[in-house]
Amino acid sequence: MRNRLHIVSFDVPWPADYGGAIDVFYKIKALHAEGCAIILHCYEYGRAHAPELEQYCEAVYYYTRATGLSGISAVLPYIVYSRRNAALLKRLAEIDAPVLFEGVHTAYFLGHPSLKNRFKAIRVHNVEHHYYAQLSAKEPSTLRRLYYMAEAILLRRLEHKLHAADAFFPLSAEDTCYFQKLYPCAVNVFIPPFHQHGQVTSKEGNGQYCLYQGNLAHPENREAALFLLREVFPYTQLPAVIAGRNPGQDIIKACGAIPGCRLIVNPDAATMDALLADAHIHVLPTFQQSGVKLKLLTALFGGRHVVTNKAMRYGTGMPDDICPVANSAADFITIVNHLVAVPFTQAHIAQRKALLAPYENAVNAKLLKKEIVGR
């Protein structure tokens, strides 16, 4: 059957409530709209089966991840070795269709002889060994720091042994260059993240607060939130809102120390949408340079002013007048306090629509379909 496609997902992509799941779910939805018959394979470890996926897929299969000691290998990263499953290989071999592996996480069977004559592509979410090395550098727990560093070493070896892949589809321009150098004979195409935004929905006028949002239990987001709470938000002219999942006591305490600062814990989708739309300034630093940050796209598609640092803008090519760059706490304070008096106008919205056109799901679904099933 033409337009048939295997997608192997590292996790169950519904609910689409974190970056990787968002990219996978909205990619499936957009490819379905383009006429692709998707056979979805999901590794499960803590997330329930999702009937919502069945409306976009010809079939959905679930596989248990081999966690704990059974997932450890001396030569392969844990994130890869723990996702080996004979039932997955059997189905991939039986159903003749191209295979899209979501991240190197799922590429255990990439070079298997059963798939030798199959078109195989990897959706590159990050240069993973860089990502894990950065996690190791920021992790306070010695045990987890050692785990991240071991993963970084094994991932670097693996990322140099992906010659069985016919194509790489990174979600940042910089990562595309990296894999183009490693695999110049493969197809290398930058395809931005898929997301929940059909169009720019930013409101005109002024909001009443600055916003930072994210999974606050993640080390990267925790570091960014604490930076803002300790070094930026005490000195800005608008009150601050921090919103996200599972904040630690350090974030709770830092937020409580700032008059007028609100912490919104585990907001549901409707609450988060309202917070995003009503903020005046989205303040988005990161200290981990990797991929295109979905929280940045969310702010650009649905929010007013956006202020970032250089690492947050990594891979996007966004100009300064769309999201000005702050390189220090003092820069963030200066830019935020300047934007307090700047209403968001129709001119801002029109400019944003033009620059975000390459990030529309329909555009990138057409491109991905052409590159995988159109060959």
Image (cartoon, grey):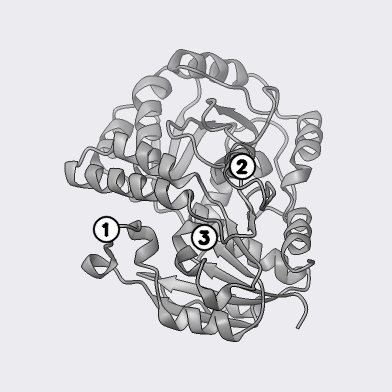
| Element type at mark 2 | loop
Instruction: Tell me the residue at 75%/64% (across/down).
Output: 369
Tell me which corner region of the image, top left, top right, bottom left or bottom right, holds residue 60.
bottom right
Which residue is label 1 attached to?
Answer: 74
What amino acid does circle 1 point to?
Answer: Ala
| Element type at mark 3 | helix
Residue 54: percent from left, percent from top:
60, 80
Which residue is label 2 attached to?
Answer: 172
Between discs 1 and 2, the one toward the N terminus: 1
Circles 1, 2 touching at the beta carbon (< 8 Å): no
Q: Nearer the viewer, residue 264 or 104?
A: 104
Q: Nearer the viewer, residue 371 or 156?
A: 156
Between discs 3 and 1, the one toward the N terminus: 3
Q: Is 336 positioned to the left or the right of 85 in the image?
A: right
Residue 207: percent from left, percent from top:
60, 33
Residue 36: percent from left, percent from top:
73, 73
What amino acid does circle 3 point to?
Answer: Ala
Q: Which quarter of the image is occupied by the N terminus? A: bottom right
Neighbour tally class for label 2: few under 14, some 14-19, many 20 plus, Cα within 10 Å: many
Question: Residue farthest to the bottom?
Answer: 94
Q: CA distance from mark 1 to mark 2?
A: 30 Å
Instruction: Tell me the residue at 29%/31% (across/down).
Output: 254
Between discs 3 and 2, the one toward the N terminus: 3
Instruction: Tell me the residue at 51%/46% (across/down).
Output: 126
Q: Is 231 positioned to the left or the right of 282 in the image?
A: left
Q: Is residue 105 above or below residue 192?
A: below
Neighbour tally class for label 3: few under 14, some 14-19, many 20 plus, Cα within 10 Å: many
Tell me which corner region of the image, top left, top right, bottom left or bottom right, holds residue 56.
bottom right
